């Protein structure tokens, strides 16, 4: 509708395509085909002919213009020549123009109604055709563009639901599937601005865009980070199996669905700024469709993540979760979150019942969070199998690979776990989560020096302590970290806090106090208990020999024995 309004405001003026893109899409990167397809849609609705236009005229190599007033003037001339009419010619001219333009508005009102069967971006079939057109370049060499295109093709080929192919100028008008358009523009100081834009082929609708500025056009890490961001967004926006479990397909408002999915994409980016953007998207989705349960749940999760970085409204997350549950109590995401909350509160039987309900009602449900929940209730092998199934769909998905390394480590399959982290770091050097998982695994293998060296940024104090005092220095540093958490000097989750205390007191030879903290931690997360069965930190062998440790083990196993294994 915006294209039509813009043209109507300039009757008789030739409006260039570039101007329409600049004014209507407000700086977002879209293809010219988006304008052409919008014009075609208006013409189809009006029964207009591009060769003999009545309403919209194409001016080759210049743009489009509204011609209804001109046709009205021609009509006025004809009727004047035929004989006298009532009223003056000026009134007749504007009456005819008003009728013509009114017809455009009336028909557009009909064609712009939401189509419940076509929410903004769901694919028509699997596999999903994805075309990568040649990059739009401005002052950038073809070699750099080729490196970007190759990285896109390589990464998207790892996602099983996509059928990816390079595009050409002739293929850009293909009416099925989606296009991921790269753009590269040279800036000052040898920098390059790179953007990727995902659009639907049949109408040019922009679904997602991401951009970054690189110090050099062929900078490998920057290129891979942007392409990985695009891959995650495309999987989240387009996978119809995932959308069914999210309950998103129950929305009849395409814009609400798209806002919700964009919020989900931003949550997955896992930065404070992306959490704020996610919050805005979820708010928009709720305004557009107040019945979309997952939008409330997404907003609750966003508040949960933001609470570690800034104050959030008191009880907001709990109230939003209650709203989501009231709207759709059997949605998998609602059931999984409720099961996690019940486990935190120590209501293990209730948590197990909810996990059972997910397995029974959604036997093919696959989600990293649910895999982690299965592991928390003692089914680590089931969590690992679910994670492997997720990786079959996308072998380079980031968080499933983190969780796979963690599950393998918990199962004491340390060499396999180490291989997973090494593969992540081979493609994304410096990945902090992979470094942290790797450090933990190396420590379990008795390779303490390598473990400390592998710690990511933020752990400089531990590295320095080890360099100065070896294991004794490391023990003391871990205890100081635990005390800082207790004082509130460090923002950590309760699970993280009690874990540090257990490790620190074990290292100081205070097994009794370590067991006390372990007992507190087990009320939060039984998954952590399994970690401590093989924690190699100094003093842990004495903790495991403590009588209370055996009792806690029996208690934990008893609490998790009813947690079902998911169908694989």
Image (cartoon, rainbow, N blue to C red):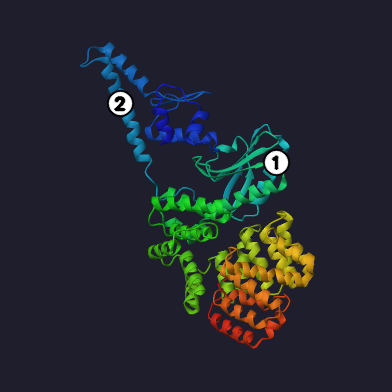
Image position, residue 215 (x, y; %): 70, 41
Above or below residue 389? Residue 523 is below
Q: Secondary structure at mark 2?
A: helix
| Residue 177 picture location, percent across and down | 54, 46
Give the image location of residue 206, x and y in percent.
51, 42
The image shows residue 265 at horizontal and vertical percentages of 54, 53
Q: Is residue 517 above or below residue 6?
A: below
Q: Is residue 242 left or right of residue 255?
A: right
In this view, the residue in front, 384 or 124, is 384
Mark 2 Cα shell of 10 Å, populated few (<14), some (14-19), many (≥20): some
SS label for mark 1: loop
Q: Residue furthest front?
A: 487
Please indicate, yes or no, whether residue 185 appears anywhere in the rendered image. Answer: yes
| On-image quarter of the C terminus | bottom right
Q: Residue at x 58, y 80 (%)?
A: 519
Residue picked out by circle 1: 215
Q: Within 10 angstroms of label 1, few (less than 14), some, or many (20 or more) residues?
A: few
Considering depth in this image, is 463 or 416 the residue closer to the camera? 463
Q: Nearer the viewer, mark 1 or mark 2?
A: 1
Q: Which residue is mark 2?
A: 98
Determine the image quadrant of residue 538: bottom right
State whether residue 381 appears in this view. no
Residue 545 against residue 234 in the figure, above or below: below
Q: Quick one: label 1 or label 2, which is nearer the N terminus?
A: 2
Compared with 138, 158 (above or below) is below
């Amino acid at each position: 509708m915006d294209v039509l309004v813009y043209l109507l405001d300039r009757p008789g003026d030739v409006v260039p395509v570039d101007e329409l893109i600049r004014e209507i899409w407000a700086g977002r990167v879209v293809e010219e085909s988006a304008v052409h397809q919008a014009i075609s849609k208006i013409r189809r609705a009006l029964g207009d002919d591009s060769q003999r236009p009545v309403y919209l005229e194409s001016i080759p190599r210049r743009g489009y213009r509204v011609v209804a007033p001109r046709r009205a003037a021609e009509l006025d001339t004809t009727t004047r020549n035929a004989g006298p009419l009532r009223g003056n010619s000026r009134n007749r001219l504007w009456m005819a123009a008003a009728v013509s333009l009114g017809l455009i508005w009336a028909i557009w009102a009909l064609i712009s109604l939401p189509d419940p069967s076509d929410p903004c971006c769901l694919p028509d079939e699997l596999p999903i055709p994805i075309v990568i057109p040649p990059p739009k370049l401005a002052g950038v060499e073809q070699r750099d563009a080729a490196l970007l295109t190759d990285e896109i093709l390589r990464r998207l080929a790892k996602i099983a639901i996509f059928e990816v192919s390079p595009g050409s100028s002739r293929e850009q008008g293909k009416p099925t599937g989606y296009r991921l358009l790269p753009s590269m523009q040279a800036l000052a100081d040898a920098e390059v601005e790179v953007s990727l834009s995902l659009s639907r082929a049949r109408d040019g609708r922009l679904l997602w865009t991401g951009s970054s500025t690189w110090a050099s056009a062929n900078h490998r890490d920057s290129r891979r980070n942007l392409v990985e961001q695009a891959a995650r967004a495309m999987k989240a926006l387009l996978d119809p199996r995932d959308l069914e479990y999210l309950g998103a397909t129950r929305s009849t408002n395409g814009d609400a669905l798209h806002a919700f999915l964009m919020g989900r994409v931003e949550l997955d980016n896992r930065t404070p700024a992306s959490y704020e953007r996610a919050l805005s998207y979820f708010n928009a989705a709720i305004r557009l469709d107040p019945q979309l349960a997952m939008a409330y749940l997404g907003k609750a999760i966003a508040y949960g993540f933001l609470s570690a970085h800034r104050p959030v409204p008191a009880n907001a997350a709990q109230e939003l979760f209650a709203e989501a549950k009231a709207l759709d109590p059997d949605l998998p995401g609602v059931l999984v979150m409720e099961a996690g909350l019940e486990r935190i509160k120590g209501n293990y039987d209730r948590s197990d019942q909810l996990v059972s309900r997910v397995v029974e009602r959604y036997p093919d449900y696959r989600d990293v969070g649910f895999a982690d929940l299965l592991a928390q209730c003692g089914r680590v092998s089931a969590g690992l199998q679910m994670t492997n199934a997720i990786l079959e769909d996308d072998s380079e998905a980031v968080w499933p690979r983190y969780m796979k390394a963690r599950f393998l480590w918990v199962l004491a399959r340390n060499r396999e776990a180490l291989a997973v982290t090494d593969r992540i770091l081979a493609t994304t050097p410096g990945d902090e989560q992979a470094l942290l998982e790797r450090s933990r695994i190396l420590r379990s293998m008795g390779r303490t020096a390598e473990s400390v060296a592998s710690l990511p940024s933020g752990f400089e104090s531990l590295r320095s302590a080890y360099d100065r005092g070896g294991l004794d220095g490391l023990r003391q540093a871990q205890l100081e970290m635990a005390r800082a958490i207790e004082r509130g000097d460090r923002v950590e989750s309760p699970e993280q806090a009690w874990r540090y205390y257990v490790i620190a007191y074990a290292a100081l030879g205070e097994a009794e106090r370590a067991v006390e903290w372990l007992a507190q931690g087990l009320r939060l997360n039984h998954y952590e208990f399994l970690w401590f069965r093989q924690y190699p930190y100094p003093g842990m062998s004495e903790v495991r020999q403590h009588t209370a440790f055996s009792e806690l083990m029996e208690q934990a196993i008893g609490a998790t024995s009813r947690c079902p294994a998911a169908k694989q």
